[in-house]
Image (cartoon, grey):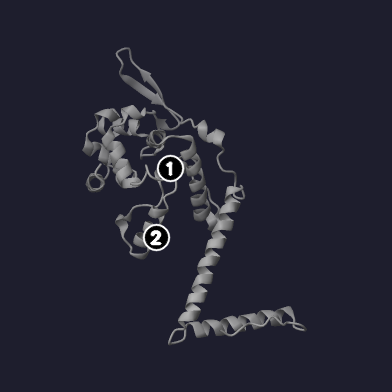
Amino acid sequence: MKGYHLNHRGQSARQIIESALSFLRQELKELFSWPPNWAKWAVYGFISVKGIAVFLQIFALLIYNGAFGPLPTRKELKDIRNSNASEVYSADGAILGRYFIQNRVNADLEEIPASMINGLIATEDARFTQHRGIDLRAMIRVLVKSILLSRESSGGGSTLSQQLAKNLYPRQNYGRFSMIVNKFKEMFTARRLEKLYTKEELLGLYLNTVPFSDNIYGVKVAAHRFFAKVPQNLNVEEAAVLIGMLKGPSLYHPVKHPERAQDRRNVVLRQMQNTDT
């Protein structure tokens, strides 16, 4: 590889830049010549990968230290309070109405059937019990299967804890850096959530926080809205319909798009079978 000599005494800044660009053009011309120069490909490939890694590390440190706004503190995460609907009952126990900003009634984990929890883990985060908020294996799988092999069934790279972080703290607009900043913020917040809550508590928080369509939040109101049941009385198929909606509440709405919702339900049931849940 020809060296680029840094002896610029007597040259203007413009001449230095033009000389550097000339060198780069020559290097690129040789790099893409035939037969390929594998040694140069290896060197430049290593430099590129290393450069990206260093950039991401620096970017992550900036985000962690509040360059794009503060992360939720331990106290804020420990004091999570979902806004609940106020319910008005008649003397015989019938609901007369609800008053709310977000239509949500929190459910205890004991009220949620095992089929719903199993379906959630099977479709959204199969390694939920094995990681601590960030699943590097899942992220690599998504990179290989979804991006390189274009397989839609490879699942997502975000863990349930990261999705919970996104539900609690909706994504912000940071211009061209929005995706990477929001992703890092969700990862850092997920790690903090995992240190503060048990896996069971995280499941309860998630299922009470997750949005459905029609201004519905949480599985308790969703079960009543779509099946006129309390969560513990849902059968496996009904639970799978609600879990299937999480991928796209409007897209898989069981009333507006029953066939699409049924297909998604079947995907959830197959995932549960494949993961032995």
Badge 2 crowding class, 10 Å Cα cut-off, few under 14, some 14 to 19, many 20 or more, is some
Marks 2 and 1: CB-CB under 8 Å? Answer: no
Residue 200 image position (x, y, % from top left): 38, 34
Q: Say what secondary structure mark 2 lies in.
A: helix
Q: Can the viewer see residue 43 in this picture?
A: yes
Tell which of 217 and 51 is nearer to you: 51
274 vs 164, nearest the viewer: 274
User: Mark 1 is on which residue type?
Assistant: Ser
Q: Amino acid at mark 2?
A: Leu
Q: Which of the 4 image quadrants contains residue 211? A: top left
Q: Quadrant of the N terminus?
A: bottom right
Relative vertical location of residue 209 with respect to residue 7 in this rendering, above or below: above
The x and y percentages for residue 173 are 53, 51
Mark number, residue 277: none
Where is the C terminus found, in terms of image quarters? top left
Report the residue that reaches farthest toward the right: 10
* Side (left or right) of 45 relative to 235: right
Residue in view at x 55 percent, y 36 percent: 74
Classify residue 232 as left or right of residue 185. Answer: left
Residue at 48% of width from left, 30% of height from top? 81
Which residue matches tag 1? 161
Q: Residue at x 39, y 22 (%)?
A: 87
Residue 174, given in percent of the width and then of the height, sits at: 55, 53
Relative to 221, is 88 above or below?
Answer: above
In this rendering, does residue 255 appear at all?
no
Q: Please tell me whether mark 1 sits on a helix, a strand or a loop.
A: helix
Q: Which mark is residue 143?
A: 2
- Does residue 192 appear to the left or right of 155 in the view shown? right
